[in-house]
Amino acid sequence: MRVAPTFNVALRALRRNKMRSVLTALGIIIGVGAVIAMVGIGNGAKAQVEAQIASLGENVILIFPGSTTSSGIRTGWGGAGTLKIEDAEAIRREVPGVIGVSEEVVSTTQVAAGNQNWFTRIFGESADYFDIRQWPLADGTPFTAQDVRSANKVCVIGHTTATQIYGNENPIGQILRIKNVPFTITGVLTPRHRCHAVHQRDETRDWWHDVAQRQRTNG
């Protein structure tokens, strides 16, 4: 079979049916473009979901207290308040294969430094929290296990809290007050917007300190 004659026949057929040839080519172009677009959108959505899951940390198990019912009113999950720091210590001590445990106590309040203040969420955590969440600091250092044991008044703040309170000033080493208790800022976290548990939260608005101090300032 000769290539040249076959090619010439094909060209003549295309010239005789120009409109059909154009519509056929357009259909092929649109079809290929649609496939490429769908693959791109699918890969983008997959990458976004994987990034959100990865932001929770690898091989992380979240444990919440149950609910309570009082006078017919159910508080929902987390309302029982039955988990204690001793439970986390028991997990560290008795569960094989666990490399990090972070107790968590959460509240919201106004924090202040100088003449600036900001309403934010407060997370009392252990020193393992940042490794568990794979959350690097933009500046400074995290609090340590020794800080937790000694109940040192230290904290790590999010990017938004740092900006709202200190502006362009470096917050590392500055004093931040919660319920009139002074805390020294040791670090600032990198901004991150992610899905946590069953709700979305902008964690650049939060700040963290060790669980021992969290229990003290909550009382």
Image: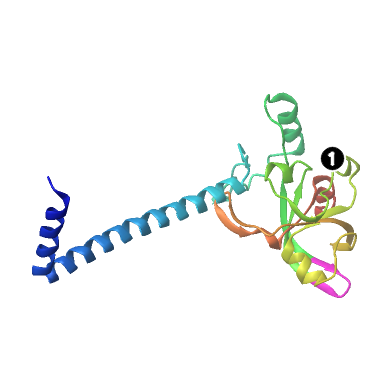
Q: How many marks?
A: 1
The image position of residue 40, as x and y in percent, is 41, 56
Specify start and end residues of the magenta stretch as a single range: 111-117
Identified by mark 1, the residue type is Ala
Task: Report the side of 61 relative to 185 (left or right).
Answer: left
The image position of residue 3, as x and y in percent, is 16, 50
Q: Residue beneath label 1, please?
A: 145
User: What colour scheme was applied to this rendering of the protein?
Assistant: rainbow
Could you tell me which residue is drawn at 89 percent across and 52 percent down?
153
* Secondary structure of the residue carrying numbered label 1: helix
Residue 85 colored magenta? no
Quadrant that contains the N terminus: top left
The image position of residue 91, as x and y in percent, is 71, 30
**In the rendered view, would you say 92 is above or below 196?**
above
Q: Is residue 17 visible?
A: no
The image position of residue 111, as x and y in percent, is 80, 65
Task: Report the side of 21 relative to 66 (left or right).
Answer: left
Q: Quadrant of residue 166?
A: bottom right
Foreground residue among 140 and 17: 17
| Mark 1 neighbour class, 10 Å CA radius: few under 14, some 14 to 19, many 20 or more | few
Could you tell me which residue is drawn at 67 percent across and 45 percent down?
133
Q: Main secondary structure of the magenta part?
A: strand
Foreground residue among 157 and 35: 35
Q: Is residue 80 visible?
A: yes
Could you tell me which residue is drawn at 41 percent across and 57 percent down?
41
**In the rendered view, would you say 97 is above or below 43?**
above
Could you tell me which residue is drawn at 76 percent across and 34 percent down?
86
Foreground residue among 180 and 128: 128
